[in-house]
Image (cartoon, rainbow, N blue to C red):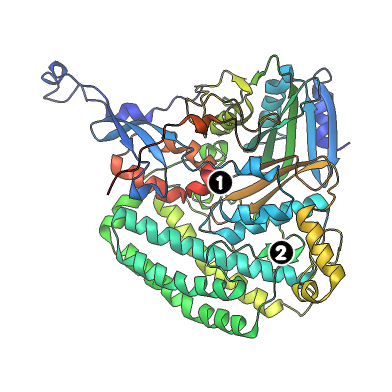
Amino acid sequence: MAFEDQRTTVYKVDPEHPESESLPTLRTEELLLNMGPQHPSTHGVLKVILELEGERLVKSTPVLGFLHRGVEKLAEDGTYHQFIPHTDRLDYVCAMYNNFAYCRAVEKLMNLQVPDRAEYLRTIVAEVQRIIGHQFWLGTQALDIGAMTVFFYCFRDREILLDWFDELCGARLTTSWYRIGGVERDFTPSLLDKLKKFLDYFPPKIDEYIVFLETNRIWVARTKGVAVISAEDAVSFGLSGPTLRGSGVDYDLRKYEPYSAYPKCEFSVPVGKNGDTYDRYWIRVMELYESVKIIRQCLEQMQEGPIMADVPSVTLPPKERVFTNLEAMIQQFKLFSQGFNAPPGEIYCGTEAHKGELGFHIVSTGGGKPYRLKIRAPSFIHMGAFDYMSRGYMIADAITLFGTYDIVMGECDR
Amino acid sequence: MHQLAQRVQNTFPVGFVSSNEWRGDISVTVTREKVHEVAQFLHDDPGMDFDYIVHVSSVDWPDDEERFEVVWEFYAIRKRQRIRLKTRVPESDCIVDSLTDIWKGADFMEREVYDMMGIRFRNHPDLRRILMPDDYTEGYPLRKDFPLRGKGWRDTFDFLDEVPR
């Protein structure tokens, strides 16, 4: 490979060492260690083959595909609407954002304009999902490193939002709430109340998480200066989201290619300096505050209005009409079974999910089914940098690395 | 024609095939002999500055003479622009230059294309299957002639006898 990594040589035996003469007589060889696929800290079914020199990682080879379900092939067999529930199962921790990214891609293909209120609803729910994702990440990352208390606190607060999702769409994890051209249903007054209450309740809790972790000497020692990646390398590897921003690149599609209601909200994008695990943690925690800010602004700005684009040949009719009106029922049936007629063409649409850039590349030849649908999954691309980033660190740091990417194997293997 | 595509055409009059702009996406098709050179130009030229690789994809067009299409998507973080680079590969000689020496991230992405579509990449450091098992013999699942339900590899698995309780 064209890129020589010098870091591995640092840990070779020092010839100047007073005992170095006795060392060459010892036989040394590298140890191969299989980690996973059934290891609790690999966040699913990920296997990594580690080549070790003592306890240092010389080379690590990720073995992916244990959760490969052929989602891209399945997409070619169903209509555009039918694929929405499949996207839930990509990154099953953050289903809403996958729905969002997919619906945006199809809307770009169909050139659909989503009504204002739907855009605000989408942004709010996407940010709630980002909070859930970061809470889940923070809890499990801390647990992997050994700080157990934070896990319970994060999951306690995550539970409130999952119940909120339950009330919103009837499911906690596999939500399928987004629709092409809008959303499935509007907020009820009770949902709005609960969300507002949560927004008041949550920021002090973030401070609590921070206190728990930053006063924990072990946790800080195991994240600061671990798995450092420079900005240049991070960009070259195609990392995205907090993993890239930790290295000081402010690449955030919410700012770079504003979509939905984000351009109407004021928020900042936290950017790290050192590119280590600690900076990436810090960015995610700061994003929790930003998400709260975005949701507040959206709630203030949101006006009454339609929640679905009115393009009967593409978008679904409202549910009340489906149950009372024959034409609406036929429309719904035809849209789901045959799909709408997409124009021939090719698009790529990237969305800033909480893990990174989640993109859909859709090739259409006309008709109701995508000819080819390619998912740009951030987890998969982050795993590409695993070998490079882990070299020279300890076995235990490999665990923090899984965490710092925030990988979910459902998305990685598709 | 968009100015980015125009610049590629002016710099590579020989390799340039066509360009397209649709829904705001710019795509440039080049011959596969020129892929590496064009990619290097996109990466290095200060006017282009595409330092970020978004994804590598592939499309199967079974009826065409040059059956496979390899698609790279690049982003320029400083200039905030996107471009899509495409090339066609015939089935009989299914190989294209690897871009791993320009973008490190291309490594896994190209392995996935190889795994799913069977397109090989010249000079790739470690071209193995990535999502499918190493001993998978049925072919390449995302090709259009591959049935959705697979080719029956799983039917050959041995069944374990039920353990009596």
User: In terms of image quadrants, where is residue A85?
Assistant: bottom right
Can residue B33 be seen?
Answer: yes
Q: Position of residue A221 (x, y in %)?
A: 29, 52
Residue occupied by mark 2: A263
The image shows residue A261, relative to residue A7, as above or below, that is: below
Which residue is more in the foreground, B81 or B73?
B73
Identity of the residue furthest to the front in this view: B164
Q: CA distance from mark 1 to mark 2?
A: 23 Å
Q: Residue at x 61, y 23 (%)?
A: B98
Q: Residues within 10 Å of mark 1 (few under 14, many from 20)?
A: many
Q: Write down the chain letter for disc 1.
A: A
Residue occupied by mark 1: A378
Q: Residue at x 42, y 38 (%)?
A: A389
Disc 1 secondary structure class: helix
Can residue A269 be seen?
Answer: no
Q: Position of residue B89 (x, y in %)?
A: 73, 21
Disc 2 secondary structure class: helix
The image shows residue B46, relative to residue A242, as above or below, that is: above
